[in-house]
Image (tube, rainbow, N blue to C red):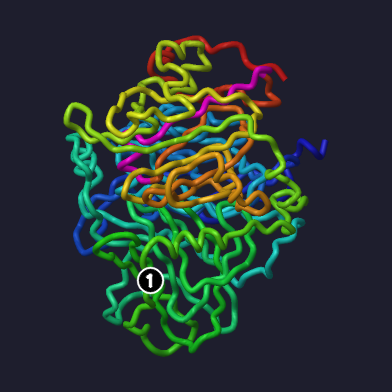
Amino acid sequence: MASVMYALLLCLSAGALSVVQGEDPYLFFTWNVTYGTISPLGVPQQAILINGQFPGPNINSTSNNNIVLNVFNNLDEPFLLTWNGVQQRKNSWQDGTLGTMCPIAPGTNFTYRFQVKDQIGSYMYYPVTAMHRAAGGFGGLRINSRLLIPVPYADPEDEYTVMIGDWYTKSHTALKKILDSGRSMGRPVGVLINGKNAKGDGKDEPLFTMKPGKTYKYRVCNVGLKNSLNFRIQGHPLKLVEMEGSHTVQNTYESLDVHVGQCFSLLVTADKEPKDYYMVASTRFTKTVLTGKGIIRYENGNGPASPELPEAPVGWAWSLNQFRSFRWNLTASAARPNPQGSYHYGKINITRTIKIVNSASRVDGKLRYAVNGVSHVESETPLKLAEYFGVADKVFKYDTIEDEPPATVEDKITLAPNVVNQTFRDFVEIIFENHEKSIQSWHLDGYSFFAVAIEPGRWTPEKRKNYNLLDGVSRHTIQVFPKSWAAVMLTFDNAGMWNVRSEQPERRYLGQQFYVSVLSPARSLRDEYNLPETAQLCGIVKDSPKPPPYSS
């Protein structure tokens, strides 16, 4: 009886109702998505607000919580949110990409239902429709460890979410028109920290406050559109403790490069003179450096922040060396009580190698970005729904790209939905090779992968001898420097349709993405959930009868 009765705890916090049941706890949210006017860089512009907030509300959850989030779309366009880094185990139905879900139509609502199963760490959410991310609609998503599972550092005094990103003053509709006309949207105008940029005129309100002598955890995510950002705090070292769901070896840094789509958790101790200090985020690998800053204030402190900002590093060799210093903490507990390092990925035989080369070219005079010569085109019918309803052949072809890119990858581009068929539970090596002069940032939904190498030049099989096969960090987003490659490894053990995309929205929107279809031959609930009863149907399956559900 007790297992099906509600427990006694009901709590209301941050716009969320938490219900603790015999099963894992539920968190309930209601979000109203609207337009509003903001002026973060001194120019009034239209923004996308969630419950009136820019950035949107934080989701504060704990491992295995069930999240029920009702989104009301009050915009004049379809809207869809993705939960960047949440693995959606067996549940790509809730992933929030246009290949898995119908967008939420204007004037309607949709309720996401998903579990943050066996994960901890710092994540974010953002819109995937049109160029909405350039107007807001993003925010932080944290997954705390369960109380019974030890964390490899003392509890901080408090935790702060820091959303950094470059920013345009053009509206999202203007940026989309530029891209639709076949041009690049150009350079951003500034950098924001939690939607603001301190003026330095003595009137800035602090973004965060710290008590002298106490240690705080800052969860820093780059939710920007184009540029890698270097993050630093005046006079305060940054101790890295977690990265995209993995506890790391706790190295200390003066500054950290955070590439688009990446999140770090940092410990900062308030052990300096009690006054104001600047938190700084500035663009990397750009001719003109854009800088955003925000105030951190010591409680009862006296004195303004120094106008002298700490210098950022120069060049990408520094950034590559920093990547190589990141190590998985093999002895820390993961979301489950077992140590992270109990999974020996370096001893598993590779069953498939997929080499991905990004390129930019023109099709009918218009700019497009491609993967192995194919520029992804969104279909009216989400790919996962087409597959589930047995009409995939009417919407897309599997394996439009091959595992080895063609010799003409850089000049010939084909427009098509881009879906790779992947055998369930195979252990796969993916090589991201970047022949371009700009840095790339790649993200994989549904999984974490082991980031085993980044090196200059072209990849060859002999390069495997340089892989980190012991303690590469398990994460979901990896940067690829200009004229360089990156290697990741993972087991495709999460059935579903999963997006692999550029984290730079311009490139994603113009085709630099693809999907991986991972089908369980058993068609069993042990491997994948059924299509939710509440799922929205669109495209050619809009009025189709639902197929027989998976069996247990």
Residue at left offset 68%, top offset 43%: 345
Please, what is the three-letter code of the amino acid marked with disc 1? Ala
Identify the residue under disc 1: 312
Answer left or right for 292 relative to 340. Answer: left
Is residue 58 in view from this perspective? yes
Which span is picked out in magenta? 504-523
User: How many numbered marks are there?
Assistant: 1
Residue 286 within the magenta-colored segment of the rendering? no
Q: Quadrant of the C terminus?
A: top right
In the image, residue 541 above or below residue 188 = above
Assess disc 1: are there few (<14), some (14-19) or many (≥20) residues with their C-alpha within 10 Å of its C-alpha.
many
Residue at left offset 41%, top offset 70%: 207
In the image, residue 371 above or below residue 325 = above
Residue at left offset 19%, top offset 43%: 174
Residue at left offset 31%, top offset 36%: 369
Q: Which image quadrant is residue 282 in?
A: bottom left
Rendering coords of residue 354 (x, y %):
51, 32
Q: Quadrant of the N terminus?
A: top right
Q: Nearer the viewer, residue 37 or 363?
A: 363
Is residue 375 in view from this perspective? no
